[in-house]
Amino acid sequence: MKKKIIVGIMALSLCFVALGAVQVQGEESDIREEMAALEAMLQKIAEQLGTTTDVTPGETVSIEGIPANFMFNQNLSQGSRGMAVKYLQIVLNANPDTRLAQTGPGSPGNETEYFGPITREAVNKFQSKYASEILNPIGLNAPTGFVGTQTRAKLNSILQKGVSETRPPVDNTIMEALKEIADAVKNLSARVDALYRAPGEEGDLSVSLRSDIRNVSVRPNENKDVAMFRMEAEDSDIDVQRIDIYVTGGSMTEFRGDIDKMYLKVDGDVVGERAINRDTVGRDDKYIRFSGLEIEVPADGYEDFVVTVTAADKSTFTNTSYTVGPTGSNAIRGVDGAGISVFASSVSGRSFELDHETTGVLTIKDNDSPKENVVLVDEDDNTEVKLLNFKLSVKDSDIELEKLRVELEGEDHKLEDIFEDVLLYQGNTLIDVQTVTIKSGTEDKEGYVVFDVEMDIDAGKEVVFSVVIDVFGMNMDTDGDRIGAKIKAEILDEENEKIAYAYDSDKEIDLKGDLQGDYQALYPSFPELKMTDSSIEADKDRTRANAYLVVDVKAIEGDITLTGITFTDAHWDVVVELGGNDVYDGSWIGTTSESTITKGRTKELEVLGVYNADNTNYGWVRLAIESIEWEDEEGNDFTWTASEYDFIEILRTGRIYLSQQSL
């Protein structure tokens, strides 16, 4: 079918004529010339469009670029990074109502892994669009920009169902021309606004050194990030236009001989680039200037920028290290909302090394180590318990790994009463067994082992190791204990021996990074807790809440008797039933038979609570178990708290808001 299109060239031209009537001193002729060029471009588009166009069926927009089984299972907010952020941007871009941007970083096909102000604004649009599902159920009437439980639920629903939008076809040639005009109009408007801007908000700008990038070594012809800095704006958005990177550690003549290029990057994108040579850097200069920048720092927010260098391709560097950063008092210049220039205060720089040798780098990473948990150990025989699972990766050069040191600690009992031998596995292969050495002055609760590894690892390879303790057959007369382990770099023991020894061409290197495993609680019998249901509701006046928790309690390898329970908020009136019998009504009232669970059996623990708000106890509330007390067959008493164990921490309802009762 046909549809008439009214070409609005004359209307837009009249806008330009009105704009031309503004007397802009010093720039009037330039602006008039630009307006004439814009009108010519509009006329060209009019000729291409003609007066009619066919309306054809729209296209279906589907979400692509996200793994089939991916779900949003973590909260996200401004400053978050990672693939989850990129997938969030892909979902938001699938709908024109919530799209981040039409072009550039964040636009469809150009999604990033950084959650910045543009992403936050798109999340606000998303939350407003689906307010009935995201905001209203939790009592909010304005978007937050925070991707929490409600927002994630809607995102996951969209991932499962997909998004479809119908839209008319677009001529790419015409769209490119329209974009060109839009950019020109934007720039022209900015120039007029700059001259006739009403007084805006003044702001302040500060800068700080970040620890994300440090101890960097750069080799010949290598391009590497060497420093990171954070710019923060107060009271107003700040448009940062210039950054001066000062250089110390040698003269500028030496620096331009050792370094070929310097870059500034924001969110991984290069925003400034300077060649370092005689034409750009004089011998008496103190800094490298990057001007013409357009880095937007949001009001009461921040933006990080990275300094990157490319080392010269030469056999010998003049200096072994330099320090770089915006260390001058006026090194960073911006413009606030009132059009006033603002400068960031000086800040410490970051040093980096220039290294001719190809030195191997040994890095430690966690490889799915056991999370904090209760581990069943044999009461009559030894049990191997894994504490750490980690990956050592090597880059830049082959290395020879000689030793690894692991520190261990127990919570209540002497290590030697629980285990002596500590085992190191590579995959399923036992590499070494060492006896724990007890540290003096620790009440025999802390110790360490130094494993003899003696292994050559090629550059680019990764090796997975596991640290395991051989736990004795445990009797509950000595009961269980929580055991933790860690590997940390550059810590010395009494003999000044380093934790890790690694050599590359007879040059000693250290383990980069550190790793600490979660505690493992060792018991030959214990209650296993699993929440199966929970609920919390408020009355219509939001002054009273009713809640319940249902938890399955199973006795593992022995009879278990529950002897106590506490809650995080004492204002709850609570009744507890175990297996259908009342065991708690403000205090523990259950008899031994009612609160005992025999080996291998499961009883249902039901918690019913009522919360009446008053003038001091109101706001966000939830019913949550703080601790559970229990004893084994031999009468040994134990207390598990939410601060110690994640499986106690999750025994809770959601949160609701209660209003203050009027007196």
Image (spheres, grey):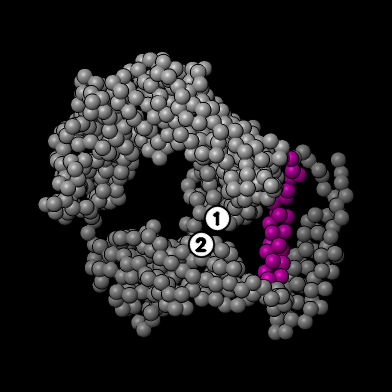
Crowd band around label 1 with a 10 angstrom C-alpha radius: few (<14), some (14–19), many (20+): many
> How far across and down, in percent of the image, does residue 502 sit?
18, 49
Per the rendering, the mark at residue 303 is 2
Crowd band around label 2 with a 10 angstrom C-alpha radius: few (<14), some (14–19), many (20+): some
Residue 178 is left or right of residue 654, and the answer is right
Q: Is residue 170 magenta?
A: yes
Q: Name the foreground residue: 392 vs 424.
A: 424
Q: Name the foreground residue: 588 vs 427.
A: 588
Label 1 to label 2: alpha-carbon separation = 8 Å
Q: Which residue is drawn at 35% across and 17% down?
A: 559
Q: Would you identify the image quadrant in which residue 630 lies? A: top left
Kindly identify which residue carries mark 1.
116
What secondary structure do most residues of the magenta stretch adopt? helix
What type is the residue that disc 1 sits on? Answer: Gly
Q: Which residue is drawn at 55% across and 76% down?
A: 342
Residue 27 is left or right of residue 233, and the answer is right
What type is the residue that disc 2 sits on? Answer: Glu
Q: Residue at x 84, y 69 (%)?
A: 14
Pick whichever of labels 1 and 2 is earlier in the sequence.
Answer: 1
